[in-house]
Image: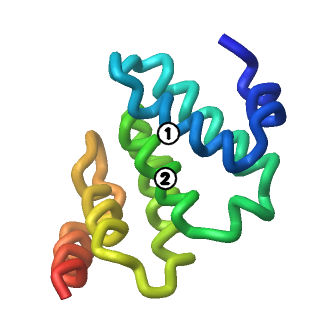
């Protein structure tokens, strides 16, 4: 597979996001493609800082990718960052963050916070 840094540079920010999406939701649901997608998003975040910072949705997308590859600590960090940046977070983001309670090991958020986030998503 092509080096992720080279691919990110070749694609640029917008095309990189599109390719990452296609790889994350590939028809075969291939794990290696999903991992590559996540690495591509991480690389875009580093190399395209200004573009990345324009929207909290980029961080939420990264959180979804981390969820897909089962990196629960990074999933929490990405969703928390998106939540902090969103201002008025939409229900989908609130539910994504609430789901961080459900993971192997120690929960990343308290059950009371997860319940509160779900309740907020219903208003």
Residue 27 at x, y percent in the picture: 35, 22
Residue 20 at x, y percent in the picture: 56, 36
From the viewer's side, name the closer residue of 58 and 107: 58
Q: CA distance from mark 2 to mark 1?
A: 9 Å
Residue 52 at x, y percent in the picture: 69, 60
User: Residue at coordinates 40% horizontally, 25% vertically from top-left?
Assistant: 26
Position above or below: 2 against 40: above
Position above or below: 46 against 83: above
State the mark number for residue 61. Answer: 2
Q: Looking at the image, is mark 2 or mark 1 earlier in the sequence?
A: 1
User: Residue at coordinates 72% horizontally, 15% vertically from top-left?
Assistant: 2
Furthest-top residue in this view = 1
User: Residue at coordinates 67% horizontally, 42% vertically from top-left?
Assistant: 15
Residue 121 at x, y percent in the picture: 23, 78
Query: Mark 2: few, some, or many residues within 10 Å (few <14, many ≥20)?
Result: many
Q: Secondary structure at mark 1?
A: helix
State the mark number for residue 21. Answer: 1
């Amino acid at each position: 597979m092509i080096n992720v840094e080279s691919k990110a540079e070749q694609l640029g920010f917008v095309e990189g996001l599109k390719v990452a999406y296609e790889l994350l939701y590939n028809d075969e649901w291939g794990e290696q493609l999903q991992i590559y997608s996540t690495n591509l998003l991480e690389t875009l975040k580093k190399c395209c800082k200004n573009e990345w910072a324009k929207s909290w949705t980029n961080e939420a997308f990264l959180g979804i990718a981390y969820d897909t590859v089962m990196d629960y600590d990074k999933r929490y960090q990405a969703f928390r960052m998106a939540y902090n940046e969103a201002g008025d977070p939409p229900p989908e983001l609130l539910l994504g963050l609430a789901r961080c309670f459900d993971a192997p090991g120690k929960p990343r958020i308290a059950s009371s916070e997860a319940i509160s986030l779900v309740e907020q998503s219903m208003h």
